[in-house]
Image: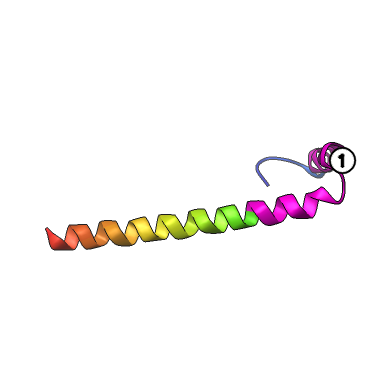
Amino acid sequence: MFGLGWPEVAIITIVAILIFGPKKIPELGSVLGKSLRGFKEEMKNSDDETKLEQEDK
């Protein structure tokens, strides 16, 4: 995963829990997931629009 081993992932997880707290981590994950989903949908929509514009030419 991105060239990270298990020790690095564990350290990042511990630091995230210390900074945000265990209650905030699921909320952050949810927000991140929704943001990525929205980004994917917009990229798909822009690709569809680009194809339509190319077909019209």
Camera-nearest residue between 11 and 5: 11
Question: Would residue 47 be counted in the magenta stretch?
Answer: no
Q: Residue at x 83, y 36 (%)?
A: 19
In the rendering, at what x and y percent does residue 46 appear?
35, 56
Camera-nearest residue between 44 and 1: 44
| Overall secondary structure of the magenta section | helix
> From the viewer's perspective, is residue 45 above or below residue 7?
below
In the rendering, at what x and y percent does residue 9 appear?
79, 43
Q: Residue at x 79, y 49 (%)?
A: 25
Please, what secondary structure does the residue beneath circle 1 have? Answer: helix
In the rendering, at what x and y percent does residue 14 appear?
87, 40
Left or right, 13 with respect to 29, comes to: right
> What is the number of callouts on the image?
1
Quarter of the figure with residue 16: top right
Q: Residue at x 23, y 63 (%)?
A: 52
Camera-nearest residue between 20 and 13: 20
In the rendering, at what x and y percent does residue 35 appear?
58, 53
> From the viewer's perspective, is residue 50 above or below residue 20?
below
Q: Residue at x 55, y 59 (%)?
A: 37
Give the colouring mode of the picture.
Answer: rainbow
Left or right, 1 with respect to 51, comes to: right
Camera-nearest residue between 9 and 35: 35
Going by the numbered disc 1, the residue's amino acid type is Ile
Q: Which residues are magenta?
A: 7-32
Q: Residues within 10 Å of mark 1 (few under 14, many from 20)?
A: few
State which quarter of the image contains the C terminus.
Answer: bottom left
Question: Would residue 14 be counted in the magenta stretch?
Answer: yes
Residue ID for mark 1: 14
